[in-house]
Structure formats: C-alpha cells, structure tokens
Amino acid sequence: MGYGERMRVLITRPEREATTLSQALGQRGHVPVIAPLFQLHFRRPPDDFAPALAASQAILLTSANGARALAEATELRSKPILAVGDMTAATAEGLGFTSVTSASGDSAALAKLVQERLDPKGGPLIHVSGVDVKGDLGPQDFVRRFALYESQQVDTLPDSARAALEARAIDVATFFSPRASKLFVQLVLAAGLAESCRTVTAIAISPAAAEPLKALPFKATVAAERPTRQAILDEIDRLAEADAQNAEHETHPMSEPSPSPLPESEPPAAPSPAPTPPPLATRPAAVRSGIGPVTAFVIGIVSAVIVLAAALFSLPYWPPEMQAMWRGPATAAPESGQASAMADKARQEVEAALRALAEAQARLRADEDKLSKTQEEFRARLDDIDKRMRALANTATQSPAPVASDETLNALRNRIETLENKPAPQPAPQPAADTEKVDKDVAALRIEIATLRSGLQNLEQAMSGQKDQATALADAIEKTKAQSNRISADEQKTLAAARASALIGIAARLDAALESEQPFTADLSLLAPLAQDNAKVAEQKATLQPLAEKGVASRAALAAGFPAVAKAALAEDLADDSLGQRVLGRLKSLISLRRVGADVPGDSAEAKLARAEAALKTGDLAKAVELVKSLPPQTASATSSWLARAEAHLAAQRAIDLLAAEGVALLAAAR
C-alpha cells in the first residue's frame, strides 16, 4: 500500500523524539522539518529516591522521556514497569529494563492496568515523570511521584519553523501535548506568522492537545483516534492519500463521468430502444504503407523505456515489500543512493533510446532525399517525352509546299488541257504518308508516360508514408525527452528536499549541543556529504570544525561567570589610578561594591561592565562582547579568557544559524 502524496511535516517534539519520528516519516516518503519547542534536561534524583525505589513494587512510566530519566537515575533494571503506551514500553525495553508491560492507551488505561495487575498490599508505586504534569496517578501514600526530567520551552519560534512557515513549505504540523500546542500558538502569534498557517493541517495527539490550536487559522485541525505516535502517522498517511486522490481527480476530471442523479420525486424513465446505427459509408480502399519492422521495433523500445523510467521514478513511493522484491536481498545502500543509481540507469536507457531514434530519423531523412532525387529524374524524363511528342505531331501535320517555276506551270497547264480532252483515267493511288512510324512512336511514348506516371504515384505514396513515420518518430522523441526531463526534475526535487530536511535536522542537533556545552564532532561529521556540492555548508562546517572536539560554553555559563570577570576587570582598571582610587577599589573588591544595570551612564570600565552584565541577562551576548572588548587594555588579563569563550560561542551560533537558514531555503526551493 502506498502512502499517497509526499507531505512536508513540522515536528515540534524534543530533539530525541523528533529524530525517531523523522525517521518514520522518511520511510513513508514524507519530508520532516524538525523544530523542537522543548529542550530535555535530566534532573539529579533526590536522596530518598533510591530507598523509595527499593521499597516499591513497580514503576509507572507515562512517557518515553520518563524511561530515559529512570535509566539515568538508577542501574536497577529488574523492577517491574507499567508503561502508558507501546512507544514508552519499547523505549524502556531498549534501555535494558527486563519486565515491561504496556497499557496501550492513555493514563486511564494505565490506571486500569494497575488495578488489574497490582495489589495495594504489595507496596507503593513509583511514578517517574517530568516537572510539568496534569496531576498524580493516585494517592500520594500509594503512588509517589519523582520529577526526574524537565522540558524547558524555547523563548522564540525555532528558525527552521519560522522560515518554513514564511516560505509556505509546510503541509502538516504535529503536536503531542496540550503544552506544545499552547506554546506553538504563542510563538506563532508573537512572530506574526498566523496567516502562514492557512495552508497547514494541524494533527494533535488528543482532543485536549487540539483545543489550543483553534486560536490559529489552520486549514484543518485533526485529533488522532488514539493518543499514540502510530495514530499520528496514520492521520498523516490518510491526509496524503486524500491529497493524492484529489490531485488525480483534477488531472483526469473526465475519465469516469458520473451519471446525473434523477430527482427523488420522479421515477427513472424506461430505457429507450437503442437507435439503429446509420449505414457505414463506403469508400475506396486506401493503400496504406506500413511503418516497417525497424520503425515498429524502435517505437516499441521507446514505449518500454518510458514505462521503465516511470516505474523507476515511482519506486521510492512503492510499499517496502514491493521495493524489496524489486531491489533484491543484496541491496544495502541508503535510499538516497538507490534512488540516484536507479535514476542514472533510467537516464542511460532513455539516452540510448534517444540515440536509436535519432539514427532511425537520420535514415528516414536519407531515404526521403533519395526519393526526392528519383522524383526529379522522372519529371525530367516526362518533360523530354512531352517535347518529343510535340515534335512528332508537327512532323505529321505539316507538309511544306514545293516552289515551282513558270515553265513548269505552263507545262502543267498544257497537260491539264490535254487531260481534259481525254477520258478520265482511273485515279492513281496516293503515295502513303510516312505516318505509320510516327503512330508507333507515339504509342510507345504514351505507354512509357503511363508507366512513369504510375511509378511517380507509387513514389509519392511511399514518400507520404515515410513522412508519416518520420512524424511519428519525432513525436516519440519529444515525448521521451519530456518524460526524461520530468523524471530528472522530480528526482532533483526529491533529493533536494531530503538534503534540506537533513540539513535542518543537523542544525537543530548542533544547536542543542551548543546550549548543553557538549562536543559535537559526531553531529558535525554528518555535514560531510552535504558539504561536497554546497559551498555555504562547507564554509560553515569549516568554521565549526575547530570547536567541535571540546564544544563551546553556553550562554547560561557565560552569564553565570561574568560577575567574577567583571569584578576582576574592575580591580585591574583601578590598579593604575591614584592611591585614593586604589584604596577605594580595594574596598569595593572586599565588600563587592559595583554598580549594575543597563542605565549606568558613562564610558568608565565600571559603567561598561554594568551594561554588559545587563545585556547578558537579556540574552544579548553580542552586545556584551562588544562592551567588554572596548574596556581599557589593563583589563585584558581579567577578561581575555571569558572573551575568547564568548566569541567562540557567537561564531558557532552564527554558523549554525546560517546552516538552518540554508536548509530552509533549499526546502522552499524544492517545492
């Protein structure tokens, strides 16, 4: 079963869940756009967590993040676990927990499973959750909740989501919690992009998650039938199939005309007898010249190539089992490589067919030139025959009169008079004119003319057939070229969309590593294939490469360490002043006297440090760096280390932002 039209899907889940969801969407032929609205942070378990876990009879998990947080908090893997859904259960099993049972539903299904499987006398239950939850699953003396992770929401709409909405490059947006829906609405309204949602269908995991989305003018808002990730995927597939059917109906609106319904009040009319078809008009049989075995073979090759190319192009959208039958068991290359190899093979076969068609067309043109020369020779011979016939006619009808002298005339008169006086003799036979030979020549010429005219007519018919064949071949060539161009264009769009989505996802991973102060060598290596033919990606990869092994300081760490840097810098600045100023500086350093706030006036080191600290509190790291760099030279020993870490963070952030922008631009261009 196919998945219909390719959909561009916005994923708002945290980075880990977004990655697994994007893989599932990619297997269905959709294009994921990752824009996490939350960043996951594991919390240190409290001191009483280990004793409570040991005394409990089972653990309740209401999310996959809860399973990950539990794995971080304890090495114990044998404690029974009751999970809210199959995805949460699969995550727990993947982390090594050996006794996992899924409720395959929501919190109500989990509560029902607890009632069926557990006895309150067997001991309390542990509920591992996040900081933000709707409520407790049971009484506190029976179900004890430990918040072991926290999903911190972002302050602004992610760049990938913003750019994709502005470019109208999103078909579906997914939401897995009411909190995510509310936050998305707030961020979109704050960014002024509400109108960009009119072409987007919102799919929520539950009616509660769909309710806040009514504040935005979505094309449609759909709640999944079940609160599971699979139900979300099913809704996306149904939407894609509906779009595919609509597109097919618009492309072939007259393929199956539906009969007009009769009014309900009128019974259907009795069928009328079929009209007698009119007699077929007789016409003389036309002499048809066949297309010939060579031309038929060439046209057959063209048709086969067109069908093969269409099949190869649509292969990525076939069901997995049919793809496996086509590709064979030895196929191990990534889908993008297979698509490229198949496209190359189709392109080579199309080019071979085009070459064969071009050769056949050249042969037809050569035959046409020969026929044209033969026709000219026949016409020249006809002209020569016409001239000869006119000359013979003149010879037969014209007899020149002899010129006689006067003596001859007188003699003739005398003879006439003599003859008149004698009885008239029998008339002598007239000498036969030499017309017999002329008649034979004319008859022969007429026969030759008739033969030539018949041959000329046959040649004209053959030339007409050759022209028809040439026209058919030319049409086949044009259709093949158009098919080849369409396959190439669609292939390029598919590859470009996949590369753009990958680039956006990698940028999101790099941004998360930046804020968590983690090394990002592995994530940066994912850019290698994308940077081969994209100078912008290669440039930003080169910028990030020196920083990848150790990572960079986060904004939070830079802001937290700045007060100590400011204190040391102020002390260095006062060290070059007068004795009174040095004494005052010493007192300030002892009792931490320093003005703070964005409104501290002046160009003194103290004023600049105060404004820099205020800029850090508002998240403006670039402004803080600019102010610190403008401090007097004597403060360099106190600020150089902090300044280097801050500039490294800014350079990495700029490179990541440019990568995300490039990915969104490529995604918009692939529409």
Image: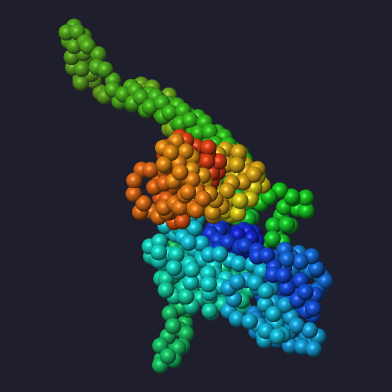
The one of 153 and 605 positioned closer to us in this rendering: 605
Residue at image point 66% right, 51% down: 335
> Between 37 and 239, which is closer to the camera in this rendering?
37
Mark yes or no: residue 377 visible.
yes
Q: Position of residue 78 (x, y in %)?
A: 82, 71
Q: Residue at x 65, y 43 (%)?
A: 549
Judge by depth and name the residue closer to the eye, 169 or 351: 169
Figure check: 114 above or below 174: below
Vertical relation: 78 (above or below) 291? below
* Closer-to-camera residue (476/316): 316
Q: Which image quadrant is residue 415 in? A: top left
Number of numbered discs: 0
- x 47%, y 85%: residue: 271
Q: Is residue 248 visible?
A: no
Q: Is residue 48 found left or right of 294 in the rendered image?
A: right
Split into 4 quadrants, where in the image is the N terminus? Answer: bottom right
Provide residue 286's location: percent of width, then percent of height: 49, 51
- Name the residue located 60 percent from the left edge and 54 percent from the top edge: 516
Residue 311 image-quadrant placement: bottom right
What is the x, y in percent for residue 242?
Answer: 53, 69
Task: Please give left or right for residue 503 compared with residue 610 in the image.
Answer: right
Q: How is the image coloured?
A: rainbow
Q: Is residue 60 left or right of residue 273?
A: right
The extreme bottom residue here reads: 265
Q: Position of residue 15 (x, y in %)?
A: 60, 59
